[in-house]
Amino acid sequence: MSKAPRYADLHLHPSMRLYHHHVDPSEKNYWPQNANQDLGTGFSRWVGKMSEGVSKVSQTHFDSCIEGHTRVLFDSLYPIERGFVRFRKHMEWLLPKSMLEALVVTASGVSSKQFHHAREDDDYFSELLEQYEQVQQHQGPSPCGRYAYKIVNSFDEMDSYLDDNDGHIAIVLTIEGAHVLGCGTPTSARLSSEQLREQVLGNLDAIKAWENPPFFMTFAHHFWNQLCGHAATFPTAARLSLNQQEGLNQGFTELGWDVMQSMLSRDNGRRILIDTRHMSARSRIEYYEYVQDHNRKNPDDRIPVISSHAATNGFATMEESYAVADTMAKKKNTPFCSWSLNISAEEMQAIHDSGGLVGVILDKGRLSGIKKLQGIERIQDPAEKRKAFSRMILDNLFELVQAVDAPTAWDVLMLGSDLDGVITHIDCYDSMSTIPQLREDLTSYLQETQYRKELWYGMEPEEIFEKFFETNAQRFLKQHFQP
């Protein structure tokens, strides 16, 4: 008798969504769907319409994961960066606080309470500890008693727990953004370099001492964290109100090198792998040079590179990808989202050579150029539209595979949806419950069209997507997720 599917997702946000949701803490529950807080104003309704491409209900609640056969969740803890709630000065002058609140609460799912807290406080580390405590405390059976979840600390523990019951969900903890260490805030900017170093490395040591330490950490995110530069992420409209200029496209700082090496060290606890998503292209170039040098010198202790929720930018090299500023014009007529945030052919080769992983995102704005996406959005027939979205995802996969030009490229790729990460999700794949449909659609498209068959390398579509949705994650965890 064959096992039930064990789909894995390298990057999603059930804990972040639940933590920032507006319900009473005593009623918080990972299992049922929840909806964004409704402020009930005309302006909030307008914001809802303007942001209708972003889900207003939870996408990764665990009932949805059970329905979608997703049993391995890389749950990304994330205290919201203050740059999302502290706007550019002209916005603060022009709009009353109630409207600024509506912008954040309606579009993102952050509660009014959390919005006001974030405006007044910048203690990221305390919020991280609260999210960690939340996911720990709720472990165990679902309200109906048929299912359960558990944070696991190794591949063997995960494998045994999933073997126990088809209704079990295994959580592998991760963190998005090294700002959680207490850096990248007005408060930390006032510290001396030695005070900041002591605070950040002390917090990192505390995380490494957790009962369930994170498997990897996304080193940068949307705003300056005093450790390394970040890549541009905001469209023009968002740039009018949110400012991510400080640190944009810069490289590593001296403190950043210290933190990165401390994360990767085994001398101070378990190694925390680095997720390069959101790092500037310049920072990524510096990091890959470090990893390549380490792996040459330490063949028995190699560091794999992770990019947990990515897509291709269509460029040959990382330097080419940031030679032109990341604007809406840059990706207007391109087949892929051509911003330096995404992965070039050179970068895919580097990740492959390190034995790493690329999680492919389900954000249509990160997968496609503007005109190409607009053409898909105009398709009226639901079946044809689904095929077009399947082709969009496949084009990204084949571009990444072609960069390596070997069958082992398929061992590097898996799902990294970023659902509940406030993304512009693909219409027909708007929650974890739709993942079986996604797999079926991708498989059927290849079977029916024989699209890019030269890049299948003799495999059948079923084998390719068994790797993508299941076995690549299992193989990687078996190799790297050990006590």
Image (cartoon, rainbow, N blue to C red):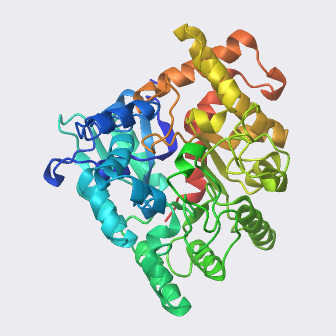
Q: Is residue 383 left or right of residue 35?
A: right
Identity of the residue drawn at 60% across and 72% down:
264
Relative to 119, does residue 470 appear above or below in the rendering?
Answer: above
Q: Is residue 375 toward the left or the right of residue 37 in the image?
A: right
| Residue 121 pos. (x, y %) | 33, 70
Q: Residue furthest top?
A: 381
Q: Is residue 144 left or right of residue 96?
A: left
Say if residue 174 shows up in the picture: no
Q: Is 387 or 337 nearer to us in this picture? A: 337
Q: In this orientation, which residue lies closer to the viewer: 330 or 155? A: 330
Q: Position of residue 58 (x, y in %)?
A: 34, 37
Q: Quadrant of residue 285?
A: bottom right
- Position of 450 relative to 246 (above/below): above
Q: Residue 477 location in percent, x, y?
A: 55, 52
Identify which residue is drawn at 53% across, 62% down.
217
**Left/right of residue 369 with respect to residue 111 in the rendered view:** right
Q: Quadrant of the N terminus?
A: top left
Residue 356 location, x and y as percent?
68, 53
Q: Residue furthest front?
A: 94
- Height in image: 31 above or below 461? below
Question: Is residue 389 in sight in this rendering?
Answer: yes
Q: Nearer the viewer, residue 383 or 374?
A: 374
